[in-house]
Amino acid sequence: MNKLDFLDTIQFPFPIQQPVAWGDMDAFQHINNVLYFRYFETGRVEFFNKTNLWKLFDEEKIKIVVGKLECNYLREVKHPAQIEISVGIKNVGNTSLVVHQVIRNDGNIVAHGEGIIVATNPETGKSTPWTEKIRAEFAKWL
């Protein structure tokens, strides 16, 4: 069994294409490791926009913050390149959401990782449970 087979159990409904910019490379002529987190962010924002979650967070008075991010680097990517960024919901907790993020180049997974997104009350800054309306939207993407 391939250690990435678990990715087959996650929906990645809105992959986006993005060219690798010349300035994304480091002195070793491959994408700088820190840029992968920016790519993950781009994917999450696109996912939240296309699923209507950004709008729901606002309507339900929920502010989201990143609680944890991790990245597993599998292959280097060099300019010029086109990458595909995909995000899917892996798990929904009481006040958190685990998303899995995948970056592909030429059909190969070059990096993947998880992000824990936490629901907070914008007035207190403390974590708060997801509303039923938001949970119903999450359920569409599990």
Image: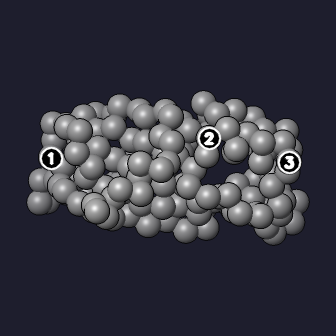
- Residue that badge 1 annotates: 78
Q: Secondary structure at mark 1?
A: loop
First reached walking from the N terminus: tag 3 or tag 2? 3
Say what secondary structure mark 2 lies in.
Answer: loop
* View extreme (front): residue: 1
Of labels 1 and 2, earlier in sequence is: 1
Query: From what the image shows, is residue 92 above or below residue 12?
Result: below
Residue, x 84% and y 42% (percent of image)? 133
* Amino acid at circle 2: Trp
Which residue does the numbered mark 3 point to in the structure image?
Answer: 132
Whether residue 125 is visible to the viewer of this picture, yes or no, is: no
Q: Determine whether label 3 and label 2 are within 8 Å by CB.
A: no
Q: Position of residue 3 (x, y in %)?
A: 31, 64
Q: How is the image coloured?
A: one colour
User: Picture coordinates of residue 116 (x, y %)?
Assistant: 59, 63
Percent x, y for residue 128? 83, 63
Identified by mark 1, the residue type is Lys
